[in-house]
Amino acid sequence: MNNIFNIFPKKIYNMNGLIFLSSLNRKSISTGFFISLNVFNKYFFFLKKVFIKTFCIIHITKYMEIKIIIINISYKRILIYPKDKIGTINFVVKTNINWKPSFILNDSKRGTKCFGSTGI
């Protein structure tokens, strides 16, 4: 399998025919990209940029194919033409964080028990 760094970021296009989405309708778009379970367990996938005015969700099928679910949240009908850009999909490496409980905030330049840029 290719190194994931050589594949992503990947632009997603509508490779189907003309898509009609009326208000609050949804459509699943295939990216044509399959991942291994090993990749799925090591990386988070996200949409870096969406080129159409819809709500988009990444869906990984039981066959490990990455699909984009497009939901029309407007009151107008949306047309997505063949070869229209849907978005850019990217990934980030999963990291484990070991949280330590804390019951007090340390003193800082902002004052006692204060945090944030306002010092409040």
Image (tube, rainbow, N blue to C red):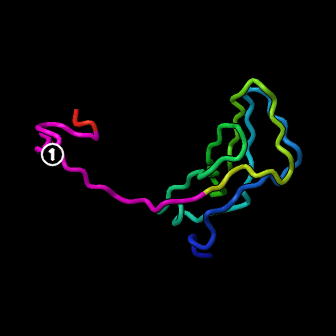
Point 65% across, 42% down: residue: 56
Of helix, strand and loop, which one carries label 1?
loop
> Left of 104 or right of it: where is 16?
right
Q: Position of residue 47 (x, y in %)?
A: 60, 51
In-image side of 117 versus 1 (left or right): left
Relative horizontal placement of residue 108, taking residue 65 as reference (left or right): left
Q: Quadrant of residue 45?
A: bottom right
Q: Residue 68, how many percent across, how many down?
A: 68, 48
Q: Which residue is mark 1?
A: 109
Q: At 76% across and 26% down in the image, what residue appears?
A: 23
The quadrant of the rendering that contains the N terminus is: bottom right
Question: Magenta stretch containing residue 74, yes or no?
Answer: no
Q: Residue at x 69, y 35 (%)?
A: 71
Is residue 32 or residue 53 the one in the foreground? 53
Q: Amino acid at mark 1?
A: Lys
Q: Count the numbered circles shown.
A: 1
Give above or below for 113 relative to 2: above
In this rendering, is residue 101 above or below 2? above
Residue displayed at 74% across by 53% down: 30
Q: In the picture provided, is 40 more to the left or to the right than 104?
A: right
Q: Quadrant of residue 55?
A: top right
Q: In the rendered view, tell whether residue 117 sits above or below residue 89.
A: above
| Magenta region, residue range | 90-117
* Chief secondary structure of the magenta portion: loop
State the image coordinates of residue 114 (x, y, percent, origin top left).
18, 37
